[in-house]
Each structure stands twice: as C-alpha cells, then as structure tokens.
Amino acid sequence: MTTAELELATTSAATADARTTMKALVYHGPGKRVWEDQPRPAIHDPGDAIVRITTSTICGTDLHILKGDLPSVTEGRILGHEAIGVIEQIGTGVSEFHIGDKVIVSCVTACLKCDFCRKAMYSHCRHGGWILGNTLDGTHAEYARIPHADGSLYSFPTGEDEEALVMLRVHRKLT
C-alpha cells in the first residue's frame, strides 16, 4: 500500500487524536479485516525502533492469515510484515540506525545473538523470526514497532523506488 492509499483510507470525520493514534489494518477473524484507529506503538525494549511506514505490501502469507489458516494470528492483530519506512524513534540499544533513516523492514526479525541467528537461520530466531503481523502487531499501519532493529531493518538504497523494493528479501551476513 502506498502512502497516498493510506492517506485516503485515513480520511475520517471521527478520527482520534493524531498524536496518539494511527490507522491500521486489523484482523478480526477469517475474512474479516478493518481499517481502525489503534494506539501508536511505543518503544518497549532497548533494541526497538518505531518506523513510520511509507509503503507496505501483502504476500501469500497474508492471504493465508485472512483465510484463517494461521491460529497464531489472533483477533485484533495489526497485519503486515513487509514494508519501507522512516525511523521515528529508537531505543537506547539500537546502534546501527538513527532517527530519520529510511529503511526496509524485513519480514523476519532477528536478535543476532541466539544460536539460530549465529547460524544465519534468522527465521528460527528464538526471540524473533516471523512475528510481525503474526504474534506482534505488523506493518499495515501508519507506524510499527520493530524489535531487534539492528537485525531486522536494512538501510534503503538512495534513489531507489519503494514499490520496487518493498518485497525485497534481504539477508544479513554475520561478521
């Protein structure tokens, strides 16, 4: 979804305080999803980043969620796990990114410290993996909290097209 589409979806006479709420696509059971006002995410852990989403997309996994095929996705979950955005806030433990950085949000979060991450098996991360839009609110919203930001975000290449790169699967090389 582009920023323009999100802005169109957010035009409502009954919107709540824009400083504390946002529009988000919320799952309400198989075949039921609604654009709703939701609280803006906040930093919970030192490794978190809050990203203002500028472009998001869906993939086949989202379609399975909407059909009700994934019981881990419960009613009230903000959907989405692939996006591009700009960092608005960072926790004290984030060292690789700064406020204002344009980033690609990976569909998989990685702590970079557990045994699976050290083997470059990020989707099996013991503290992350595929959690956005699954067990943690996702990226089909104006803002998203990204845990383990240093292992879950990637710098957006200057001059590139957001829509062309939004589904890019990036891989991190351990040093």
Image: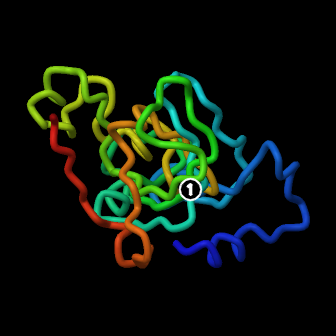
Can you give x and y, in whole percent of width and height, for residue 113 in the image?
A: 24, 22
Name the residue furthest left. 119
Which residue is located at x 65 percent, y 33 percent?
42
Q: Is residue 37 left or right of residue 84?
A: right
- Number of dots carrying numbers: 1
Q: Secondary structure at mark 1?
A: strand
Q: Of the residues shown, which amino acid type is indicated by label 1?
A: Val
Can you give x and y, in whole percent of width and height, for residue 81 in the image?
A: 40, 52
Which residue is located at x 49 percent, y 47 percent?
138
Classify 168 as above or below 8.
Answer: above
Can you give x and y, in whole percent of width and height, for residue 104 in the image?
A: 40, 57
Of residues 54 and 30, the one drawn nearer to the viewer in this rendering = 54
Which residue is located at x 80 percent, y 42 percent?
20
Of residues 162 and 12, the one drawn nearer to the viewer in this rendering = 162
Classify 156 as above or below 88.
Answer: below
Which residue is located at x 53 percent, y 51 percent?
27
Can you give x and y, in whole percent of width and height, for residue 79 in the image?
A: 49, 52
Badge 1: residue crowd in 10 Å (few <14, some 14–19, many ≥20)? many
Of residues 161 and 169, the one drawn nearer to the viewer in this rendering = 161
Indicate the quadrant containing the C terminus: top left, top right, bottom left or bottom right.
top left
Name the residue furthest right. 13
Rendering quarter of residue 115: top left
Q: Which residue is mark 1?
A: 86
